[in-house]
Amino acid sequence: MSEAITPRWLDRDALARYINAKVNMLSRLVEQGKLPRPSNHLGPRSPRWDIYAVDAAMLKASGFPIPQSTDEAVALACEEITIAARRRKDRPKDARGRIG
């Protein structure tokens, strides 16, 4: 069983595929602040986006809180799990105890 490995640095085409957008939309998304500016560490004609920065920017643009540390990330995940469990518990059940 082999898993596809996503590279850390994405070129324009790979970024467009990753976020399911057209290549010509990338510059507009950068200007709107929905995507980070690319790094030109390979030269000005070879911009690359850090996949982690892209994920964080997309989450921030969607209104999700971005954890600053691992402890914060774990706390947020636990809170989401607890909320989901409460929702399941509060759903009405039929006579046999099944959720209806």
Image (cartoon, rainbow, N blue to C red):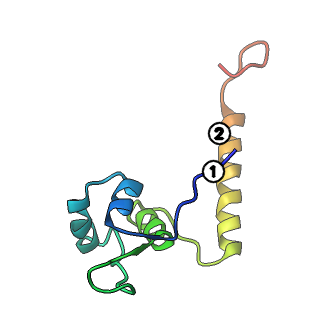
**Where is residue 81 drawn, in percent x and y?**
69, 50
> Which residue sits at x=58%, y=53%?
4
Q: Is residue 64 left or right of residue 69?
A: left
Q: CA distance from mark 1 to mark 2?
A: 34 Å
Give the SS element for disc 1.
loop
* Label whose residue precedes the other's in the sequence (1 or 2): 1
Residue type at mark 2 is Arg
Q: Residues within 10 Å of mark 1 (few under 14, many from 20)?
A: few
Q: Quadrant of residue 14?
A: bottom left
> Which residue is pictured at 26% across the width and 80% down the height?
45
Q: Where is mark 2, residue-wise? A: 87
Question: Relative to 26, is 97 above or below?
Answer: above
Q: Is residue 66 left or right of residue 73?
A: left
SS for callout 2: helix
Q: Residues within 10 Å of mark 2 (few under 14, many from 20)?
A: few
In the displayed structure, 85 sits above or below 99; it is below
> Could you say which is closer to the camera, residue 81 or residue 53?
53
* Discs 1/2, front: 1
The residue located at (37%, 69%) in the rendering is 11
Disc on res. 3: 1
Picture quadrant of residue 21:
bottom left
Q: Nearer the viewer, residue 56 or 85?
A: 56
Q: Farthest residue to the top: give it.
A: 95
In the rendered image, residue 56, in percent from the top left (x then y), is placed at: 48, 69
Q: Nearer the viewer, residue 80 or 47?
A: 47
